[in-house]
Image (cartoon, rainbow, N blue to C red):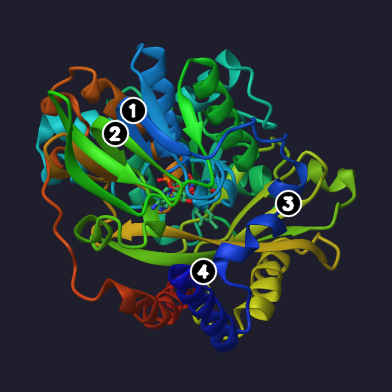
C-alpha cells in the first residue's frame, strides 16, 4: 500500500511538472495496443512455486531467453510486473535494425572487446534480424512482420566516406549490406535531400507489441510458465532442501529458482540497483498519423523499408499496414512534452517529405529505454548464478532477441567465452537519475551539430 502511494505520488509529480502522461500510463495509448492480437492467457504468481531458472521481465530479452530455455527443455518461469511488452518492447517503433548505433561498427567492437569477441558481438547482432523473422515464421507470430529492409540515409555528403567504410566492415563479416547512391536513397525514401544510404535488407518492421506477445505465446507453448502482474519486490539467496538458489518475492507469492536472470531494462525500480545504475533512462516519443492516401506509398518508402537517418537527432519513419506513418524520437525537454511530442516529430517529417499532406495524428505514446554510457550491451553478475542483462541502447529489438537466445545457451552449459559480451560486475555511473537533465542539454547541442553539418555541405 505504502509503495502504491509512493508510486502514485511519483507519477502525479511527474505529470504536474511535465504536462504529459507518465510513460507508465501511455502503454494503452499506442497504435500497437489498439491493433496487436490479444496477449496469451497468463496467471499471477500466487503462493509458492519453483523453477530451475527464473527470468524477471517480460520484454524481448526476457521472453527470448525464456523461449529458448524452454525449447532446450529447461524448467523456466518468467515473472513480469505488468503484462508482456509493458516496457519498451510493447511501445517502440517496430524497426528491426540489425546493428548498433552509428559508429559502433565492427572495427570499434574489436578495439573494445578484442577481435574474436568483437566479431562475435557483431555477428550475433547482424543475424538478429534474421533471427526475429525466423521466430515469426517458426512460431507463426501475428505481428505484421515485414523483412523489407532497414535503411539509414545520409543527411550530409560528408558522411559518404563513413558509409563506404561501414559497408566494407559489415560485408567483411558476411553481412549482405549495401551502399546506396544519393538518387537511390531519395528514391527509396521519397525525400530529395539525402546523399546516399546504408541498406541492410535483413532488417524491416513489425508491430512490436504483436511480436512480444507472440514470443510470450511461443514460450508458453514450449513449456515456459509466464506469470504477469507479478512484480518482483526482492530477491535473496536461499536454500530449498539441498538446493541452493534464489527466492524471488512478489506481493502474492514466492518463486524459488536455482538461477536468476533479470531483464528489467530501464524499469527495475531498485531490484538490483548496482546493475540498473549502469544505465541512463531515456524517454522516447512516438506518433502514428491518421491513415494516408495509399497512393503516397508509391513515392514514400515504396519498398516498405524502415528508415532512420544519420542525424544525431535522427528522423525515423515507417508505414503501418493501414497506411499510417509512424515517427518519433527524443525531445529536448520533458516539460510540455505531451504537446511538443505531438507536433515536433510530425513537423520534421513534413519538412523532409513535402509531398505529404498536412499530417494529423491519431496516436501518441512514449516509453523508456536504457542506455549505457558507451551504448554497449551489459551482462552482469549479481551473485552465484544470478545475472542482470541490460542490452537495449535504443536499437534493441534485434539485440535483445539475439542476447536472450545467447544467454539461454549460456545458462544451459555454454561458456562465458561464447557470449557476445563478457559477464562483468556492474559498474554503476554516478547519479543516473540526473541523466534526463543531461539529455536535455545534450539534445540541443546535437541538433546544433546537425544544423552545422547541413550548412557545411
Ligand atoms: C519509444 C521507443 C522506441 C523504440 N524504437 C525502437 C525501434 O524502432 N527498434 C528497436 O530495435 N528498438 C527500439 N527501441 C528500443 C527497444 O524497444 C528496447 O531495446 C527493447 O524493447 C528492450 O527490451 P527489454 O526486454 O530489454 O526491456 P523491456 O521491454 O523494457 O522489458 C522490461 C520488462 O521488465 C518488467 N519489469 C521491470 N521491473 C520488474 C520487476 N521488478 N518485476 C517483474 N518485472 C519487471 C517491465 O514491466 C518490462 O515489461 C525503442 C524504445 C522506445 C522506448
In this orientation, does residue 239 appear?
A: yes
Say which label, 2 or 4, has the lower sequence index: 2
The residue lying at 50 percent from left, 82 percent from top is 333
Under 8 Å from ligand 1: the CB of mark 4?
A: no
Q: Which residue is mark 4?
A: 330
| Mark 3 → mark 2, Cα distance in angstroms | 37 Å
Q: Residue 380 — which label?
A: none
Whether 8 is drawn above or below 354: the answer is: below
N-terminal-most mark, 3 or 1: 3
Mark 3 vs ligand 1: CB below 8 Å: no
Q: Residues within 10 Å of mark 3 (few under 14, many from 20)?
A: many
SS under mark 4: loop
Instruction: Using the numbered discs, state the Cα–Cα distance from disc 1 to disc 4 in whole angstroms.
Output: 41 Å
- Residue at (39%, 76%) from the top-left corner? 436
Task: Tell me the mark number nearer the camera, choosing from 3 and 1.
Answer: 1
On screen, residue 321 versus residue 432, left or right, reads right
Q: CA distance from mark 3 to mark 1?
A: 37 Å
Q: Position of residue 55 (x, y in %)?
A: 35, 36
Q: Are marks 1 and 4 in contact (CB under 8 Å)?
A: no
Q: Is 191 placed above or below 9 here? A: above
Q: Is mark 2 within 8 Å of ligand 1?
A: no
Q: Nearer the viewer, mark 3 or mark 4?
A: 3
For marks 3 and 2, the one nearer the N-term is 3
- Marks 2 and 1, the one that precedes in the sequence: 1
Where residue 152 sits in the image (x, y, percent)?
50, 48
Amino acid at each position: 500500500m505504502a509503495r502504491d502511494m509512493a508510486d502514485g505520488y511519483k507519477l502525479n509529480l511527474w505529470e504536474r511538472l511535465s504536462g504529459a502522461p507518465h510513460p507508465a500510463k501511455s502503454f494503452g495509448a499506442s497504435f500497437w495496443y489498439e491493433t496487436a492480437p490479444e496477449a496469451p492467457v497468463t496467471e499471477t504468481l500466487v503462493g509458492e512455486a519453483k523453477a530451475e531458472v527464473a527470468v524477471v521481465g517480460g520484454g524481448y530479452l526476457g521472453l527470448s531467453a525464456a523461449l529458448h530455455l524452454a525449447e532446450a527443455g529447461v524448467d523456466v518461469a518468467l515473472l513480469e510486473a505488468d503484462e508482456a511488452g509493458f516496457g519498451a518492447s510493447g511501445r517502440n517503433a517496430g524497426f528491426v535494425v540489425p546493428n548498433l548505433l552509428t559508429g559502433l561498427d565492427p572495427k570499434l567492437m574489436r578495439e573494445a572487446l578484442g577481435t574474436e569477441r568483437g566479431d562475435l558481438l557483431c555477428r550475433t547482432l547482424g543475424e538478429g534480424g534474421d533471427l526475429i523473422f525466423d521466430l515469426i515464421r517458426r512460431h507463426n507470430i501475428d505481428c505484421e512482420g515485414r523483412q523489407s529492409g532497414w535503411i539509414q540515409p545520409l543527411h550530409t555528403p560528408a558522411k559518404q566516406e563513413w558509409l563506404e567504410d561501414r559497408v566494407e566492415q559489415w560485408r567483411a563479416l558476411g553481412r549482405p549490406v549495401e551502399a546506396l547512391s544519393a538518387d537511390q536513397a531519395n528514391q527509396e525514401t521519397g525525400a530529395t535531400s539525402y546523399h546516399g544510404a546504408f541498406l541492410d535488407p535483413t532488417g524491416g518492421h513489425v508491430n512490436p507489441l504483436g511480436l512480444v506477445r507472440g514470443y510470450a505465446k511461443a514460450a508458453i507453448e514450449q513449456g515456459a510458465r509466464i506469470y504477469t502482474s507479478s512484480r518482483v519486490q526482492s530477491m535473496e539467496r536461499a536454500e530449498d532442501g539441498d538446493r541452493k538458489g534464489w527466492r524471488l518475492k512478489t506481493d502474492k507469492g514466492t518463486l524459488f529458482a536455482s538461477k536468476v536472470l533479470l531483464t528489467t531494462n530501464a524499469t527495475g525500480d531498485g531490484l538490483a540497483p548496482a546493475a540498473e545504475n549502469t544505465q541512463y533512462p531515456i524517454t522516447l516519443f512516438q506518433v502514428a498519423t491518421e491513415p494516408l492516401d495509399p497512393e503516397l506509398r508509391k513515392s514514400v518508402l515504396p519498398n516498405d523499408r524502415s528508415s532512420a537517418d544519420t542525424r544525431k537527432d535522427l528522423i525515423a519513419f515507417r508505414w503501418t499496414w493501414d497506411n499510417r506513418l509512424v515517427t518519433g524520437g527524443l525531445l529536448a525537454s520533458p516539460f510540455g512534452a505531451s504537446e511538443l511530442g505531438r507536433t515536433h516529430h510530425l513537423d520534421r517529417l513534413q519538412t523532409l517529405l513535402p509531398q505529404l499532406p498536412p499530417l494529423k495524428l491519431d496516436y501518441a505514446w512514449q516509453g523508456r529505454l536504457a542506455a549505457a554510457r558507451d551504448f554497449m550491451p551489459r551482462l552482469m553478475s549479481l551473485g552465484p548464478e544470478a545475472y542482470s542483462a541490460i542490452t537495449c541502447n535504443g536499437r534493441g529489438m534485434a539485440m535483445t532477441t539475439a542476447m536472450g537466445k545467447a544467454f539461454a545457451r549460456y545458462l544451459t552449459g555454454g561458456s562465458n567465452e561464447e557470449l557476445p559480451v563478457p559477464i562483468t560486475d556492474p559498474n554503476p555511473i554516478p547519479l543516473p537519475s540526473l541523466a534526463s537533465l543531461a539529455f536535455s542539454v545534450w539534445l540541443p547541442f546535437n541538433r546544433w551539430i546537425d544544423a552545422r553539418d547541413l550548412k557545411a555541405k
